[in-house]
């Protein structure tokens, strides 16, 4: 978040994680030790090394604005609801619902869990997430790594997860 101009926002759970990670040393030895102890997962370790030519440039900062529970933002003609949600990907996930546009930004919320399950899925958490998120009156679902879906396409996408992962 240090690269953004202006204020940054994070849920308290996420900010607590950022606070912890901001104390980490960014050297190959320190990263290998975190990987060895399980403090970091192989997936993140690998992708950090791909993303950063010089890992000493890593800079993790906490948010300027921290919220707990839900947050609603009035952007003039748009209302964005930021809602913490139990999900199969992480313990600190949120979804953003743009009320007037009926768009739900899910990010990685319906993706696998890399710290405990090496990218796999906890079926209880997945089905709970689906049941909860489908209570939003969204017409467009924005995933973090694939194109936007309408409701029907979202159901087909989830079915592939069920067929391949659960």
Image (cartoon, helix red, strand yellow):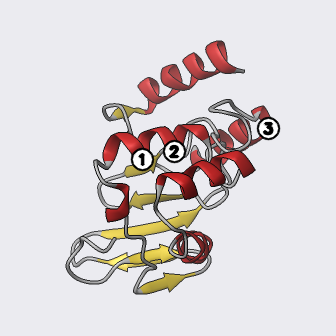
> In the image as oriented, which residue stretches furthest toward the right?
124
Sort mark 1 into few (<14), some (14-19) or many (20+) by Cα contacts within 10 Å.
Answer: some
Q: Mark 1 points at which residue?
A: 48
> In the image as oriented, which residue stretches furthest toward the front?
29
Residue sitting at 46 percent across and 48 percent down? 106
Residue sitting at 23 percent across and 83 percent down? 6
Report, in whole angstroms, how far the alpha carbon at label 1 lies from the one at label 3. 30 Å
SS of the residue under disc 2? helix
Q: Which of marks 3 and 2 is in front?
A: 2
Q: Where is residue 144 in the image (x, y as percent from the top left)?
A: 39, 42
Q: Is residue 164 above or below residue 95?
A: above
Q: Name the residue under label 3.
A: 124
Sort mark 2 into few (<14), some (14-19) or many (20+) by Cα contacts within 10 Å.
Answer: few
Q: In this view, does 22 lie to the left or right of 55?
A: right
Asked which quadrant contains residue 125, the reply is top right
Report, in whole angstroms, how far the alpha carbon at label 3 lies from the one at label 2. 24 Å
Residue sitting at 51 percent across and 44 percent down? 45
Q: Position of residue 5 (x, y in %)?
A: 20, 78
Q: Are marks 2 and 1 in contact (CB under 8 Å)?
A: yes
Sort mark 3 into few (<14), some (14-19) or many (20+) by Cα contacts within 10 Å.
Answer: few
SS of the residue under disc 1? helix
Precedes in sequence: disc 3 or disc 2: 2
Image quarter where the N terminus lies is bottom left
Image quarter where the C terminus lies is top right
Precedes in sequence: disc 1 or disc 3: 1
Foreground residue, 79 or 15?
15
Asked which quadrant contains residue 161, the reply is top right
Q: Is residue 147 above or below residue 102?
A: above
The dot on residue 44 is 2
Q: Can residue 152 be seen in this view?
A: yes
Residue sitting at 40 percent across and 86 percent down? 64
């Amino acid at each position: 978040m240090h690269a953004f101009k202006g204020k940054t926002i994070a849920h308290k759970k996420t900010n607590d994680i950022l606070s912890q990670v901001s104390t980490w040393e960014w050297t190959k030895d320190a990263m290998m030790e975190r990987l060895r102890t399980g403090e970091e997962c192989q997936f993140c370790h690998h992708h950090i090394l791909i993303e950063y030519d010089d890992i000493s440039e890593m800079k993790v900062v906490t948010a300027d604005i921290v919220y707990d529970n839900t947050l609603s933002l009035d952007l003039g003609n748009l209302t964005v609801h930021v809602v913490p949600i139990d999900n199969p990907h992480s313990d600190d996930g949120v979804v953003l619902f743009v009320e007037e546009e009926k768009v739900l930004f899910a990010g990685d919320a319906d993706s696998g869990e890399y710290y405990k399950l090496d990218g796999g899925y906890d079926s209880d958490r997945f089905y709970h997430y689906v049941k909860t998120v489908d209570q939003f009156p969204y017409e467009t679902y924005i995933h973090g790594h694939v194109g936007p879906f309408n409701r029907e396409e979202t159901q087909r996408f989830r079915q592939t997860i069920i067929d391949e992962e659960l």
